[in-house]
Image (spheres, rainbow, N blue to C red):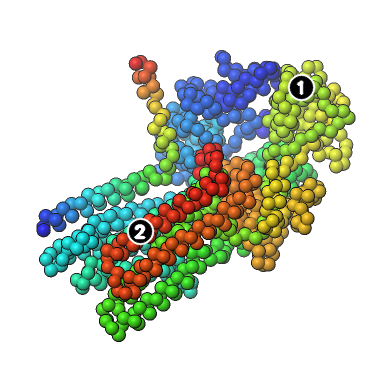
């Protein structure tokens, strides 16, 4: 039965890691603006653009 | 004077088919302003293009075709006040003396190109280290190096590429006042509740399946029990603390709100479970507890969606400028508006707002009070006349002496009225809170009846049944139906362009009995005017061509309206074009001297007639254009429809000129009042409410602010939701006025849906109670019943309101343009 307790603790710790990751995401403002990042990702840097032209 | 730059002398050639400006895409009135094969509509646009071109930022134009912001007729913003240490300090988010953070509101942000350009600002000036755009809020956060660029220069840099930051008095933060921090606690609470809910549920599985027998595995069962207690304590005292606190606060004042029965349920669940686990008599209901709070918080999150840039509680400070130029002797310096004192002399340029009451000292004042008093036309003032705060000077530069402080001016003192007290907020009890009162008493009665029944028979069973009733009767489903049903409807309305402050407004809307309209800006459109020409003989094609060519040169709203009325057609070259601010325009077209302007400009004497825009060819008056406020389309139909159900009133700050036009629209017996001061409007709404009416007020200006606040539902009509709107319960796209009756009906039907959801919740409660009162409520039944009822209420709420919206056909076509404003 001890192994069960061990596994439960392990799963809890894992869940806790996810919770902390969520906290970090909220605190860093990722939930404040859910629109701009979706646009920003589509804008390449100029560096990339030149690479394309060289292709 | 910078402002007088509007008056330019130039010879302009007009192409037959207007070229599109390479910067902003607007038609070019001339082909003279060019750079290579690129044409521009004005010098401003050309300059921006040059700046971007030099810095290799022309991708701006590739990302979005009409990226550029037209600079035609734009007044150069003055940012001198940003050098003032106290203003600077209050605007900066952070500074360590060298590196500073600031955020600016840029209403011009509109497309992906804007994001790209603003986030590449560091390429324009190396003093800028970082710039991040928040698109929905139309804000840019900047980190800059003070040793290389000052705050003022940052603002001027932004203005130079067409993104002039809008800085208002409300941006000044009081030093002692806490800086508004984004409230993210709901996310944290939701995260904790979700985390605990999942784990507690998982740990409770052996219990559901009957696998955990304390006699067999005492260690395991106890361990799990302790873990569950730890997890759910977090949920109760962290995630659920707002419910407990709110219930307690209300109870202290002798009220019951919806949080009272919820807290009762939470505490009963928690207490009973603690008791069971600690006395080794059972596993408790901690899984149900965590689930309950998780669902409640999801509901709260769902209804608490904010519309970013839309603000429902703005006061005059969001409309007033942050600073004014004070004149002392021959010196001029800018001073933050909060520090203006009576006796100071200030200088106002074209388009600037009067910050406080005062007396005109010098200059030709044409004051546009339309936003403040509702008067639709600018008022001419003479030296020695009183000027009221909130008016906008049009034309030349004036000087005035202040007689009042900003906060004590005639208009701003409206905000000292009782209606603006925070205490007033909860003047009516919300539906859910009204129900909560009955609910709590019923639950407590039932619980004690059960206790009384079981007590003589079995002590421990009596205690079990008593707590079980409290647990099962927890109005979780009831508490969820409003957030999800109304919350979903709110989203649908927002998509359409009608933004409500919160779910309670929808509830209030369904109870409305009287509707009060404002005139200027509400019944009539502020920007769009009805034009017709009055002259000896109608305009011939020749004259039309001349006037069209001339009026195209000016960006003044009146010239634009006349130009629109003249329609598309042939154009001719304009020579010696000159615009005299506040008076009119003149120029030479095809050898004829054309003048277009006010009666004063052309030297026409005339009493009432003098309102229009006069046209003169070669020194001969050919007639004048009359510009009338255009009533919103479909107004007659809407008013007729509304009249069937509601009492209609109209309050206008304007004179009675348009009574004859409006009375037939309102029909017989309607009450129309003119020359209403802002305070009169507030009193009028108060008087209606004293008669027991539920008042919906539709307005738009600062002068309606008091009445909007006082009324049960105050809705602001906005042509552009980026503009200032006074405090209100809702903001509606002006084009939607025609659908007001439908929206009101939609609100009523929504209320019925909530009643339906309540009925559903009641069924669950009765089923649960039948178990609880017989002392048969096992953790498994609770664990099934609780989520089942919550989920079905959520589904019912969302699906039924979506279906209702679909059925009414209100939301058939989605207004795409409003997506950006959400």
> Is B643 on the left or on the right of B139, as rendered?
right
Kindly tell me whether residue B415 is visible in this rendering. no
Quarter occupied by residue B578:
top right
Residue at image x 39%, y 45%?
A31
How far from the left and from the top, in percent, is residue B635?
A: 70, 46
| Front disc: 1 or 2 | 2
B505 to B273, vertically: above or below: above
Q: Chain of mark 1?
A: B
Q: Residue furthest top?
A: B36
* Residue B105 place in picture, x, y as percent: 52, 41
Left or right: where B322 falls relative to B433: right
Where disc 2 sits, the SS reads: helix
Q: Which residue is mark 1?
A: B545
On screen, B52 above or below B713?
above
Residue at (74%, 45%) from the top-left corner?
A: B376
Q: Earlier in the sequence, mark 1 or mark 2?
A: 1
Q: Taking the image as drawn, is residue B597 in sight?
A: yes
Classed neighbour count for the residue bearing mark 2: other residues with Cα under 10 Å, few (<14), some (14–19), many (≥20): some
Numbered tag placed on residue B805 in the rendering: none
Chain ID for label 2?
B
Q: Are marks 1 and 2 in contact (CB under 8 Å)?
A: no
- Element type where label 1 sits in the image: helix
The quarter of the picture where the N terminus of chain B appears is top right
Q: Nearer the viewer, residue A1 or B252?
A: A1
What residue did someone put label 2 on? B788
Q: Which residue is depicted at the point 70% across and 61% down?
A: B684
Residue B400 on image: x %, y %: 71, 46
Q: Could you tell whether A40 is left or right of B462 in the image?
A: right
- Provide residue B643's location: percent of width, then percent of height: 70, 55
Which residue is pictured at 20% across the width and 51% down the height?
A: A11
């Amino acid at each position: 039965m001890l192994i069960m307790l061990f596994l439960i603790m392990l799963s809890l710790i894992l869940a806790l890691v996810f919770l902390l990751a969520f906290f970090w995401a909220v605190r860093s403002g990722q939930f404040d603006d859910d629109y701009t990042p979706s646009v920003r990702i589509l804008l390449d840097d100029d560096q990339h653009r030149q690479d394309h032209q060289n292709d | 004077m910078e402002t007088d730059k509007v008056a330019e002398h130039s010879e302009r050639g007009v192409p037959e088919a207007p070229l599109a400006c390479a910067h902003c895409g607007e038609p070019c009135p001339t082909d003279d302003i060019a750079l290579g094969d690129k044409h521009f509509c004005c010098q401003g646009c050309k300059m921006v293009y040059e700046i971007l071109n030099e810095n290799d930022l022309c991708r701006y134009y590739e990302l979005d075709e009409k990226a550029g912001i037209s600079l035609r007729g734009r007044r150069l913003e003055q940012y001198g006040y940003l050098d003032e240490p106290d203003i600077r300090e209050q605007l900066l988010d952070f500074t360590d003396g060298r590196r500073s953070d600031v955020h600016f509101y840029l209403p011009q942000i509109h497309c992906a190109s804007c994001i790209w350009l603003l986030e590449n600002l560091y390429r324009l000036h190396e003093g800028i280290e970082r710039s991040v755009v928040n698109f929905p809020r139309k804000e840019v956060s900047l980190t800059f190096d003070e040793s290389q660029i000052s705050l003022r220069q940052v603002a001027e840099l932004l203005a130079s590429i067409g993104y002039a930051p809008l800085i208002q008095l409300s941006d000044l933060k009081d030093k002692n006042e806490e800086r508004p921090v984004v409230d993210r606690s709901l996310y944290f609470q939701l995260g904790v509740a979700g985390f605990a809910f999942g784990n507690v549920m998982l740990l409770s599985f052996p219990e559901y399946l009957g696998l955990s027998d304390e006699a067999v595995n005492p260690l395991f069962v106890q361990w799990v029990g302790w873990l569950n207690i730890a997890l759910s304590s977090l949920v109760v005292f962290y995630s659920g603390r707002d419910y407990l606190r709110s219930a307690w606060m209300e109870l202290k004042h002798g009220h019951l709100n919806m949080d009272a029965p919820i807290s009762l349920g939470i505490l009963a669940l928690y207490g009973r479970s603690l008791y069971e686990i600690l006395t080794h008599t059972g596993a408790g209901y901690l899984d149900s507890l965590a689930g309950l709070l998780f669902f409640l918080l999801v509901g709260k999150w769902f209804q608490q969606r904010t519309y970013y840039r839309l603000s429902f509680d703005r006061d005059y400070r969001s409309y007033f400028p942050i600073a004014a130029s004070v004149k002392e002797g021959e010196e001029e310096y800018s001073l933050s508006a909060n520090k203006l004192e009576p006796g100071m002399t200030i200088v106002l340029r074209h388009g600037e707002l009067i910050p406080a009451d005062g007396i005109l000292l010098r200059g030709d004042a044409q004051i546009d009070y339309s936003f403040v008093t509702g008067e639709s036309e600018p008022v001419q003032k003479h030296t020695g006349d009183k000027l009221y705060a909130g008016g906008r000077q049009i034309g030349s530069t004036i000087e005035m002496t202040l007689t009042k402080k900003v906060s004590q001016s005639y208009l701003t003192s409206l905000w000292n009225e009782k209606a603006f007290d925070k205490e007033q907020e909860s003047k009516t009890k919300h539906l859910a809170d009204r129900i909560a009162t009955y609910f709590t008493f019923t639950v407590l009665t039932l619980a004690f009846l059960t206790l009384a029944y079981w007590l003589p028979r079995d002590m421990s069973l009596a205690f079990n049944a008593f707590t079980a009733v409290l647990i099962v009767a927890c109005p979780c489903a009831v508490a969820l139906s409003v957030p999800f049903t109304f919350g979903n409807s709110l989203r649908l309305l927002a998509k359409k362009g009608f933004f409500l402050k919160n779910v309670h407004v929808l509830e209030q809307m369904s109870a409305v009995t009287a509707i009060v309209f404002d005139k200027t800006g509400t019944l009539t459109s502020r920007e769009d005017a009805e034009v017709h020409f009055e002259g000896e003989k109608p305009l011939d094609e020749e004259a039309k061509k001349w006037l069209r060519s001339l009026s195209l040169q000016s960006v003044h709203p009146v010239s634009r309206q006349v130009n629109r009325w003249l329609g598309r057609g042939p154009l001719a070259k304009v020579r010696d074009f000159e615009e005299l601010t506040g008076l009119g325009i003149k120029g030479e077209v095809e050898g004829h001297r054309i003048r277009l302007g006010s009666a004063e400009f052309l030297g026409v004497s005339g009493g009432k007639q003098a309102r229009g825009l006069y046209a003169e060819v070669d020194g001969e008056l050919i007639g004048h254009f009359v510009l009338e406020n255009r009533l919103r389309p479909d107004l007659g139909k809407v008013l007729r429809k509304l009249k069937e159900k509601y009492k209609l009133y109209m309050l206008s700050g304007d004179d009675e000129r348009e009574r004859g036009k409006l009375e037939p629209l309102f029909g017989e017996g309607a009450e129309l009042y003119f020359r209403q001061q802002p305070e009169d409007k507030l009193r009028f709404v108060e008087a209606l409410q004293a008669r027991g009416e539920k008042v919906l007020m539709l307005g738009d200006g600062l002068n309606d602010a008091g009445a909007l606040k006082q009324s049960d539902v105050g809705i602001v009509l906005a042509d552009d939701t980026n503009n200032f709107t006074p405090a209100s319960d809702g903001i509606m796209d002006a084009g939607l006025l025609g659908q007001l009756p439908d929206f009101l009906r939609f609100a009523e039907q929504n209320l019925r849906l909530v009643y339906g959801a309540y009925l559903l919740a009641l069924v669950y409660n009765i089923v649960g109670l039948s178990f609880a009162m017989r002392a048969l409520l096992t953790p498994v039944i609770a664990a099934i019943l609780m989520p089942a009822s919550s989920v079905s209420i959520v589904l019912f709420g969302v699906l039924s309101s979506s279906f209702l919206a679909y059925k009414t056909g209100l939301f058939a076509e989605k207004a795409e343009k409003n997506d950006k404003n959400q």
